[in-house]
Image (spheres, rainbow, N blue to C red):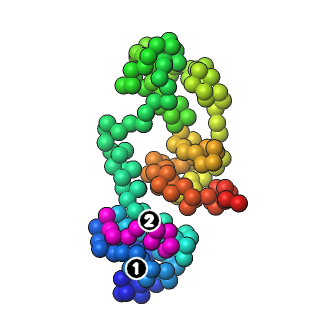
Amino acid sequence: MESVAGLRQLEYLNLYGTQVTDRGLARLRDLKRLDKLFLWQSQATPEGAAKLREALPDLRIDLGEDAEAMLRGLDGDAKPAPINTECPVSGKAIDPAVTSELDGKVVAFCCADCKAKFDADPDAFRSKLGLDAPRTPINTECPVSGKPVDPAVTSELDGKLVAFCCANCKAKFDADPDAFRSKLGLERK
């Protein structure tokens, strides 16, 4: 790590699967251009990463959350749970395999016919789902990439709807939302 600490222009560092420890991370404090650090399956702890982030507040550190989120996204069985237990169209018990999305949330139905009715006019069923009004994201630029957002790709922070340009940026945000607070004007007081 001593040699790496001398690379002042370094922007990305992948220490995946290495034996680097918190002591080794402390040697990186002077790498002011370091933007992203991958620590998945290393000996570094979240506490050591937090100390490094104090010295380099803009540094994005991945302790494995980004990779794990991506892998969950690739797993065809790993779908978010539906927000409802009863079909918003018929009132019957849901079949979790019959779903649609509304505001980034999974809505389940009892059958394909109810799904088709819902898909034709989802706003008509908002109140039954507790999603009374369509929400507008607080941002027009992705807080991760700076690109224009896709309003269908969202997360929440402090009860506010935040949009992203893609699912990858959403996963990065979800792994460490606090790292993006300042870009969204949602600093903690």
Res 150 → quadrant: top right
All told, the count of numbered labels is 2
The answer to whether 60 is drawn above or below residue 123 in the figure is below
Residue drawn at x 64%, y 61% as measured from the top left: 182
> Nearer the N terminus, badge 2 or badge 1?
1
Q: Nearer the viewer, residue 14 or 42?
A: 42
Q: Is residue 44 left or right of residue 175?
A: left
Label 1 crowd (10 A; few <14 / some 14-19 / many >=20): few
Going by the picture, which residue comes out furthest to the right?
A: 189
Give amino acid for label 1.
Arg
Question: Which quarter of the figure is the C terminus placed in?
Answer: bottom right
Res 78 → quadrant: top left
Secondary structure beneath label 2 = helix
The answer to whether 86 is drawn above or below residue 103 in the figure is above
Question: Which quarter of the figure is the N terminus placed in?
Answer: bottom left
Q: Percent position (x, y) of residue 166?
A: 48, 48
The answer to whether 97 is drawn above or below residue 157 in the figure is above
Q: Is residue 184 magenta?
A: no
**Residue tagged 2:** 46
Q: CA distance from mark 2 to mark 1?
A: 13 Å
Q: Which residues are magenta?
A: 41-52
Secondary structure beneath label 1 = helix
Q: Percent position (x, y) of residue 160?
A: 64, 45
Residue drawn at x 40%, y 79% as measured from the top left: 23
Q: Is residue 188 left or right of residue 75?
A: right
Q: Percent position (x, y) of residue 26?
A: 45, 80
Residue drawn at x 53%, y 39% as measured from the top left: 152
Point out which mark residue 23 bears. Answer: 1
Q: Is residue 44 magenta?
A: yes
